Amino acid sequence: MKFLMQRFSMNAIAFAATALLAACGGGGDATAPLTSQTISFTPATTGTVGTPITLEATASSKLAVSFTSSPATVCTVSGTTLTLVGAGTCNVKADQAGNTTFAAATQVSKDITVSNTATPMAQAALVVVPGASTLAPSATTALSTTGGNGTGAVTYSVTSGSCSISGTTLTAGASTGTCKISAKKAADSSYLEVMSSEATVTISNTPTTPSTIIATFSETGVSAIGFGNMDAAVIDEPTLTSNKVLQLVKPANGETWAGATINTCGTGKIGTVPTLPLSSSNKTLSLRVYSPEANVPVRLKLEDASDSTHSVETEATVTAANTWQTLTFDFSKEVSGTAALNTAYTFNKASVFPKFGSTVGSPLTFYVDDLKFIGSSSVSLSCPDAPITGTPTTAAATPSASPSNVISIYSDTYTASTGIDLNPNWGQNTQTSEITVVGSKVQKYTNFNYKGIDFANNPVNVSTFTKLHIDLWSSDATSVDVFIINPDTGTGQATEQLQNVPLNASTWKSVDISLSGYDKIDRTSIKQIKLVSNPSGKTVYMDNLYFAK
């Protein structure tokens, strides 16, 4: 009996110990609680149909967040890209399902209001431009505008004086005097209405040669791009601050061909100046020039902004120093050794070269003003919009080459070589910007004719490398010529060689170009790369430019 009582007592104690251990969380079968997590998700609250949104959300657990969207008539989601397909309210949900350590996060739901168009914006300043500033009584001239944005219609009105307007034609009154005119560009789905300031037209019996002012350099947005080390800037005229002029400074290290391209059209346009209708009867332009020296040749070159092989060049001479002179440029008298005038060509790019053909011992400052087309007072001053093209919605493939076998010019994956200028001023029409496509930085070339990349201050030796890699995307260009350049080393001529890369529309083209194809290039000291669009004037995206073994 005593043995049975001891056994019962021992079992009771063991049972109590087991119960106590379980209550305290002990024991091999117990499961630890999961750690909670939260999601931070603050997307844009509005969007526009056709403009994708990249979704970004983070979980406190650092685990990846997934997204779903509804309804499909308004938006769809793939990975982190939200595509807006219709007007309405798009609901986006962010989720993190958790794992063996973290519990599922509380879902975060956000609404995005999607509209068919963006909120209308203010237009750029609008300038009304009469084809002639002086008219004989009852004479007519064409009206045009510069500036403004969008597709809204332009209308003209007489604000004072005896002139009349029908459409885009201004008719002077029967008596001498002045009249003032203005223009209005209507609103559209993207831009608000804008009014111009007034322009004055003088009615005079004094006969004048008809002409159209292409640039006075007082217009809003007019600019110039120097090349060959020419410094170009629109400034207040030093002796008449109410007037603006183009200042050109040719430095001691300036090239013999240093000059500047005049741009009255602005960005997003085809050409840098309006199309100039050269013909057998109207083939001259005039330009006012102020030179610090006498007997200085000034060259004026016209070309097709989309085809640099279509050009014509002529010269006139400044005969007096430190005074304004009006030079007349007759393009039927082309410079010896340059192309003759072909009136079938389009001429919508103008460049000026003061003291062409010579270097200078010390900087020389020139001023130019009032570029005019002679022979017609009705040249249209409008510049057509560059075509709107697609944008890649996916990034180029991430390169897999080992960094030790790469000399990078441009890529998120590799550290770029030092001293690289991605946008040197070579007189190109190309507008360059850097955008982000699904987290990857990409170079965007708009109105792309050609594009230089310069690293002359830190040449690269690729004598042991075998290929040049590049990723290209375009919806409208058919191919890109990829040049490697050895600059002039005293021979008077740079050495360049190209390989053509055909493109597939709206798809990234990833290509390794064999360096054996550049057999004329000294690969021990490469200093420049040039890209050329085929055809010109298109939009191309570039990524992952590097040499590899």
Image (cartoon, grey):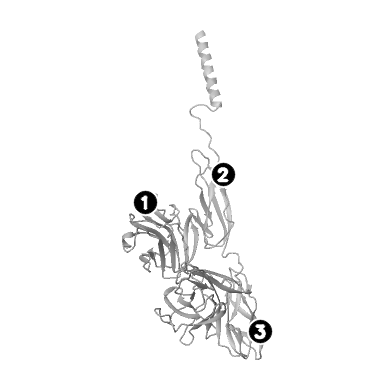
Q: Which residue is mark 3?
A: 179
User: Would you say residue 267 is visible in this rendering?
Assistant: no
Above or below: residue 548 compared with residue 353: above
- Dot 1 alpha-carbon crowd within 10 angstroms: few under 14, some 14 to 19, many 20 or more: few
Q: Which residue is mark 2?
A: 38
Element under disc 2: loop
* Residue 217 percent location from the top left of the image: 57, 74
Task: Classify residue 497 as left or right of residue 537.
Answer: left
Question: In front here: 505 or 96?
Answer: 505
* Residue 17 percent location from the top left of the image: 54, 20
Q: Give the crowd class for mark 3: few <14, some 14-19, many >=20 residues within 10 Å.
A: many
- 412 or 353: nearer the viewer: 353
Closer-to-camera residue (528/438): 528
Q: Which residue is mark 1?
A: 405
Provide the secondary structure element on which disc 1 rests: helix
Q: CA distance from mark 3 to mark 1?
A: 71 Å
Snapshot quadrant of residue 237: bottom right
